[in-house]
Amino acid sequence: VVCLAMTVLWTDDVKARADAKADAKESRTESRTDAETESTEFASEIEAESSAEWVTSLWLDVKPAADKNDAKKRPVLDQVTALGSDIFNEDPLAGCSKRGGWRLHVAVGQRNEQVEMMGFIVFRIKPERNALIIAQLAVPEEHRRMGFGSLLLKTLIAEAKRLPEIHSIGLSSLPGSIKFYKRHGFKLMHRLPDSEAKAEGQVYMELKTPSKKKK
């Protein structure tokens, strides 16, 4: 009888330990599943954020007079005016017309329904001087060091190199922008006289473009 009782007790003890082990394994499995689910949800959130990055495009030869009534372009043009007035104390759109002779390229970012100006460049072609002149290049502070200024400048340089009548690109640089233009091949030619400079230390810089032969 004693042996039978000990056998029953031992059997019950083994069964209890087996049940406890199974419960622990199930608990670990559930915890791991919850963690994996949470990790998957977090990854999905990151992916959703990444998919919402800015999609950048260039608006070439923007015509302010014609585009100001465009519901999509009007807010961007207002941003160009605000930035130009803040940096250069003048509206960049003022001379951008057939009569004024200045032309405008704008870098634009779009995210979902939001459209924002990432930078602009104002220039004109001077055939009598065989030159392309850049008047203004600006990028909003929150979008600087992201390549928008370089994108605008490189686009214009490539455009100048395709034109047989253009032998150089000229611009007046503020002191803080000299290194930027040097990185793109411009050379410092001379300092502007005080009577011509709009800011202290302003210099004239130039980039020679290879001579092209007309076909």
Image (spheres, grey):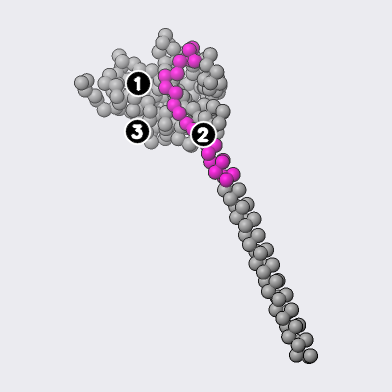
Name the N-terminal-most of marks 3 and 1: 1
Q: Position of residue 113 (x, y in %)?
A: 56, 28
**40 in relation to 69, above or below:** below
**69 in relation to 207, above or below:** above
Magenta range is 44-67
Element assignment for label 3: loop
Q: Name the residue under label 2.
A: 54
Quarter occupied by the N terminus = bottom right
Whole-number angstrom distance, CA of label 1 to CA of label 2 = 31 Å
Q: Where is residue 74 in the image (x, y as percent from the top left)?
A: 54, 18
Quick one: 11 or 80, which is closer to the camera? Answer: 11
Horizontal placement of 164 versus 53: left or right? left
User: Mark 1 is on which residue type?
Assistant: Leu
Q: Residue furthest toward the top?
A: 99
Q: Residue at x 60, y 48 (%)?
A: 41
Give the label on residue 185, or none. 3
In magenta segment, residue 11: no
Element assignment for label 1: strand
Quarter occupied by the C terminus = top left
User: Mark 3 is on which residue type?
Assistant: Gly
Q: Name the residue under label 1.
A: 132
Whole-number angstrom distance, CA of label 3 to CA of label 1 = 15 Å
Whole-number angstrom distance, CA of label 3 to CA of label 2 = 29 Å
In this view, the mark in front (3 or 2): 2
For the residue carrying disc 2, how many other residues have a C-alpha within 10 Å: few (<14), some (14-19), or many (20+)? some
